[in-house]
Image (tube, rainbow, N blue to C red):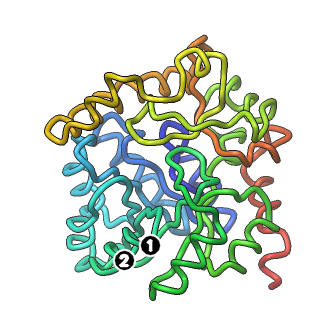
Amino acid sequence: MAPMFLVSNVVMIKEAMQAGITGAIPALNYRTDSQLRAAIDELKTQEGYFGINLIVNSSNIKYKSQLETCLEKKVDFIITSLGNPKEVIDKCKPLGVKVICDVIDLKYAHKVEALGADAVIAVNSNAGGHAGNINPEQLIGELKTNLSIPIISAGGVSNSKDIKDHISYGASGVSVGTVFIASNEAGVSQEYKQALVDYQAKDVVRTTKMSGSALTVINTPYVQSIGTEANWLEKLMHSNKWIKKYVKMIIAVNGLRKIKKATNQATYKTVWVAGPVIEHIHAVRPISEIIGDLTQGLKSE
């Protein structure tokens, strides 16, 4: 179960662990360190494995403290996103905490493997949220040919057939996100969940206006009204290497505020993050039922 900003919660991960799979929660889903610690402690009471997702670039001002908490609590694994994972890998290795790094291409995958990553999450062009640019078969094939560490495929998985396909491409496993948003246990509004049922793959677009990086969202009327491309001023600021980091940080903070409001309440400013697999979501269901469909016929093989 993929870590999903503002969506993942302890109940979801416990359901995943009870069903025999693993999952991770973004550290940024918790406003305070004490809340993060409480979540980790609660998950440790459940049999199975779980991880924490860390944003490791400068946009996450809580990164250092979140890492120290994960190390102190010895979570099973950490997923790194949007930055250089060197510090995380160096500090986790002596403790036996596994580090899995999001990658979108072979260049970055080579870098994290050289740093000592235990595995990579290959984020392909069908992913929800921060998606890659390469289709699953091509990306997994390229990584499988050139890496010696396991590859977990992220993007475009909605059922057991999709999992079998990604394994056949060379993946060791899959990271599944969007279908779990439309679950009873997901910590989002009913309007958000229903949107995943009502909209289709053709309604998913990429926007650079929410986080500073390409983000896949449902093309709601509000998204249509603000557009999906950076305006001339945003592009100008992005082109300046001296201020680019700070501009991206400001865009991320403002954009994530909008996403947070839309995630938790009905509002005309609806920015709902999702991948094109919403095409295959037809109802809001319990997580146990969703996992049952995903793993049907896999264990016997």
Q: In 3D space, how far apart are the residues under numbered discs 2 and 1 (Cα atoms)?
A: 6 Å
Q: Where is residue 70 in the image (x, y as percent from the top left)?
A: 30, 59
Label 2 secondary element: helix
Quick check: 35 left or right of 176? left
Type of amino acid at the residue the image marks with label 2 = His
Residue drawn at x 33%, y 49% as measured from the top left: 37
Q: Marks 2 and 1: CB-CB under 8 Å? A: yes
Residue drawn at x 42%, y 28% as measured from the top left: 230
The residue nearer to you, when weighing 218 against 44, is 218
Can you tell which quarter of the image residue 173 is in?
bottom right
Residue occupied by mark 1? 106
Q: Position of residue 124 (x, y in %)?
A: 57, 60
- Binning the other alpha carbons within 10 Å of mark 1 as few (below 14), some (14 to 19) or many (20 upward) gives some
Residue drawn at x 78%, y 79% as measured from the top left: 299
Quick check: 96 left or right of 137? left
Hey, which residue is sitting farthest left in the picture? 242
Quick check: 75 left or right of 62? right
Q: In which quarter of the image is the C terminus?
A: bottom right
Label 1 secondary element: helix
Residue occupied by mark 2? 110
